[in-house]
Amino acid sequence: MTGSDTTDEEAETGATPTTGATLTDDDDRTSEAEPDDQSTGAESTESTTSEKPVRSAPGGRRAGGADAGGSEKTKRFYNELGWTETGGRPRTVDLFGTKEDGPIRVELHHAAMQRIHDAITLTGSTIDLLECGCGGTPELDLLDLCSHYTGVDFSETGIRRARRVLAGSGVDHELHLADVCDLPFPDARFDAVYAARMIYHIPEPEAQAQALQEMLRVTKPGGVIVIITANPFPILFPERSLKRLIAITPVLGPLANRFRPPPPLPYQPMTLPWFKRQVGEQGSVDLISSGLPSTAFNQRVSEFQGTGRRLWEAVRWIDLTMPRVAVWLGNYTQITITKH
């Protein structure tokens, strides 16, 4: 894992409990910091294996310049490290995944997935689903909802791995190598769009806004967009909030960067009100917790003994009894947009 050192009492980075290959991000070193699990591109269908080139935005639709899409830095990280494998599993699991799976983590992971299921099935029991930033770990827990699954990512390494993962799924699927800021699909194509822990790795806010507009564009009226994103200012993690505040402060951010190693990935989490403003009159927005713990907390605090177990019991109680309040308390939020 990368990021700042933390103790059980001061875990300040970002993640959700996970079983298997669900990952997150890490440390607020700068306005451009922090690793995670999802990138942005994919390719091929079950019957077609030729890779498609990453599309350039027509007419200069991307905002913010040549690197305003998913970011070349993010692509390199996942192509050269994140989606490469050791022992048959992606390196991202070792970097950002949990170090132990206890009953509390498992219960919270299942609760988070159930909230995603509940949001996506607002459109029906079987859906035409697009996952943006599927990387090398497409969300297998959602395949039982799909009449057809489409994955998009801009990492060639991720797409190759996703193809292998989905090969035996039995679900009709296709993968596309493309940037989420310029999706290669017609308007109103999908019943639902899902994007987990990827949008904040797009370095420019304008490009994040473009990515969100693209998700809205390809969603049918009445369909839903489910985004799992980071809360930049989690109340229960004040040290993490302070680091983010320093990162976005014009003088303090660059000064702090001089004394820290460069982060492996861009990291630019936008505030939750920002998402509501971007959606505007195009849809209704609902917020619910997708996980209180940070990556450091998740990796370093054991739920099996002493203070760690009591902390995890508190996390469990907050997340399960007040998930809408927990949106502001913890590190990860599920944003559900119902398109008008």
Image (spheres, helix red, strand yellow):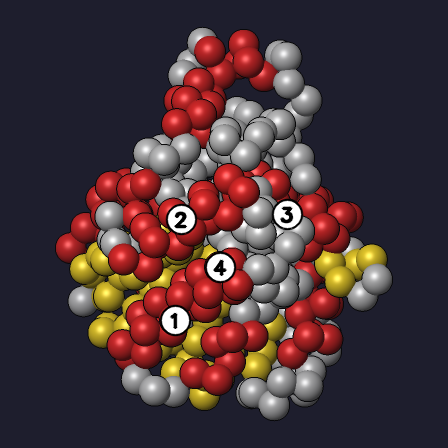
Along the line of sight, which residue is nearer the eye, 208 or 13? 13
Where on the picture, by quarter, is residue 176?
bottom right
Residue 234 location (% of width, % of height) = 36, 36
| Helix, strand or loop under label 3 | helix
Label 3 and label 1: CA atoms lie apart by 22 Å
Front of the two marks 3 and 2: 2
Q: Residues within 10 Å of mark 3 (few under 14, many from 20)?
A: many
Front of the two marks 2 and 1: 2
Do residues under tags 4 and 2 come within 8 Å of each other at their CB atoms?
Answer: yes
Q: Residue furthest front?
A: 306
Q: Is residue 274 left or right of residue 179?
A: left
The residue tagged 1 is 114
Q: Which mark is on residue 104?
A: 4
Look at 69% across and 46% down and name the residue there.
95
Q: Residue furthest right?
A: 87
Look at 51% across and 75% down and name the residue there.
141
The residue tagged 3 is 96
Where on the picture, by quarter, is residue 76?
top right
Label 2 and label 1: CA atoms lie apart by 17 Å
The residue tagged 2 is 315
First in sequence: mark 3 or mark 1? Answer: 3
Residue 171 location (% of width, % of height) = 56, 87
